[in-house]
């Protein structure tokens, strides 16, 4: 697939936030952000079948939030690095911000 976003590995992720990419795939933006697993997995399967190492799309919660899907079997060995996990305490301001953005309350 010739359209995408550059990555650190030099591979192209298919950018489903780009209207040109959506047109080339004949996929509407409402389908990308659908909360229907069958719909979104079908789009991801088309991207994977085209040989891309992954895709980017916007969140169904907020358009300015983006997610990346990586098909790890297509990435060069050692391409991913992980930091140490952080335990999120219930008093963490980041948790309060996230809950507020999603319109949720903590069931504590």
Image (cartoon, grey):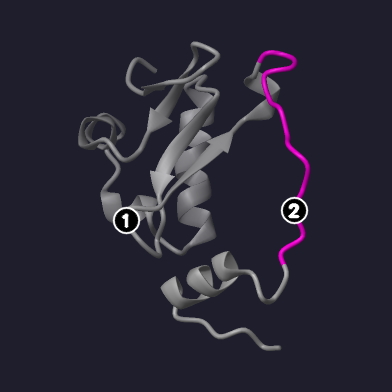
Q: How many marks?
A: 2
In the rendered image, residue 82, in percent from the top left (x then y), is placed at 73, 34
Find residue 19 and report its horizontal and vertical position in percent.
21, 37
Q: Residue at x 35, y 38 (%)?
A: 16
The residue pinned by badge 1 equals 63
Compared to residue 105, the image places residue 80 above or below, namely above
Q: Nearer the viewer, residue 88 or 37?
A: 88
Give the quadrant of the C terminus: bottom right
Residue at the spot of label 2 = 86
Side of 75 where 29 appears, left or right: left
Start-end of magenta stretch: 76-88
In this view, the residue in front, 45 or 29, is 29
Tag 1's secondary structure?
loop
- The residue mark sitting in front, 1 or 2, is 2
Q: Quadrant of residue 80?
A: top right
Which is more toward the observer, 78 or 29?
78
Q: Which residue sits at x=51%, y=68%?
A: 98
Q: Is residue 26 left or right of residue 16?
A: left
Q: Residue furthest bottom?
A: 108
User: Helix, strand, or loop for circle 2?
Assistant: loop
Q: Is residue 19 above or below residue 6?
A: below
For residue 9, side relative to residue 56 (left or right) = right
The stretch drawn in magenta includes residue 45: no
65 vs 29, left or right, is right
Q: Position of residue 5 (x, y in %)?
A: 38, 24
Disc number for residue 89: none
């Amino acid at each position: 697939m010739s359209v995408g976003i550059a990555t650190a590995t030099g591979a192209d992720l298919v950018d489903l936030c780009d209207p040109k990419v959506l047109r080339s795939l004949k996929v509407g933006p409402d389908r990308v952000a659908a909360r229907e697993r069958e719909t979104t997995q079908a789009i991801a399967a088309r991207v994977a079948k085209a040989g891309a190492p992954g895709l980017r799309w916007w969140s169904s919660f907020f358009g300015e939030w983006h997610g990346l899907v990586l098909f790890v079997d297509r990435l060069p060995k050692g391409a991913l690095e992980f930091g140490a996990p952080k335990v999120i305490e219930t008093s963490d301001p980041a948790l309060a911000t996230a809950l507020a953005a999603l319109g949720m309350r903590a069931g504590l």
